[in-house]
Amino acid sequence: MKDEMNLMAEAMAGGQTTPDVSIVGAQGQTGNAGQNGQTGNGGVDGRNANCNWKTGCSSGSSGTNGADGGDGSGGIEGGEGGDATDAKIYIGELSGTIFVAGRGGNGGNGGNGGNGGNGGNGGTGGNGDKDGAYSHDGYNGGNGGNGGNGGSGGKGGDGGNGSRVTLSYGKLDSGANIVPITEPSNPGNGGSGGVGGAGGQGGKGGSRGGGNGTPGATGKAGDHGADGDSGGTPSVITVNAGPPPS
């Protein structure tokens, strides 16, 4: 038989892109993505002050703070690749070249983490007032809520194991070749971490000197998920001259 690498190069040059016989385990499922965090509720606007030149001023109030955004949940682990099944193949007479490939299924990728929810905006501060000798300054706006943190990505699944393939033939014509191709399956990639939510805007201060609220902080991005621990063991393909395997 010819050298296997030369045979594969000739086949690819001739336009062949897939093996003639493939015994491969099932691909592991991709993990579900995590849920996004909820947006924080906005703060309540403050009450306005009211001044009367006879009776003085009634008090208003500041805007309340916006609520923090919820954290995104973590992505789910990718599924493990399936093991390939054992197989026995018989070829009575071969006149060309065939490529026989076997391996376990690749591990599924981990799901991406959910994004953090945005923080709620702070409420607007109540306005001040003036009437006659009485006056009251405006009230401060509420602070914006912090953005929620992104969820972590899910871990990738492990690759499945290869199988034992026995291929027997009765006769090989001149120039005929049987080329086994084995390789370990690949573990799945870890999912991406979710994006941190944006901080809410600070509420506007009320007129007549109320201060603006402070914006909320942006949430942290989630950690990237770990890749699967390992690929599977390669298939073992045995080629023998002889009768059909029992």
Image (spheres, helix red, strand yellow):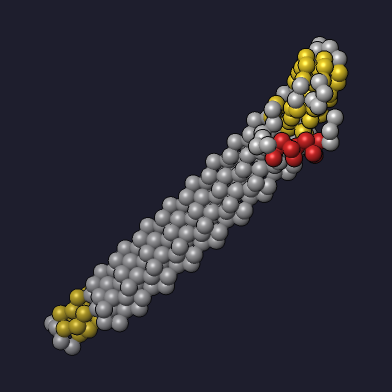
Relative placement, left or right, of 57 versus 179 is left
Q: Nearer the viewer, residue 237 or 159?
A: 237
Residue 193, x across and y down, in percent: 57, 53
Relative placement, left or right, of 228 versus 67 is right
Report whether residue 202 is seen.
yes
* Above or below: residue 79 compared with residue 114: above
Quadrant for the N terminus, please. Answer: top right
Asked where in the image residue 29 lies, by quadrant, the reply is top right
Q: Nearer the viewer, residue 3 or 110?
A: 3
Q: Extreme left residue here? A: 54
Q: Which residue sits at x=16%, y=83%?
A: 131
Asked where in the image residue 171 lies, by quadrant, the reply is top right
Q: Which residue sits at x=45%, y=64%?
A: 199
Q: Extreme front residue here? A: 174
Q: Which residue sits at x=18%, y=79%?
A: 51
Relative placement, left or right, of 198 versus 166 is left
Residue 244, x across and y down, in percent: 80, 12
Asked where in the image residue 168 lies, by quadrant, the reply is top right
* Above or below: residue 203 compared with residue 235: below
Q: Which residue sits at x=43%, y=61%?
A: 119
Residue 207, x across and y down, in percent: 26, 78
Q: Nearer the viewer, residue 154 or 182?
A: 182
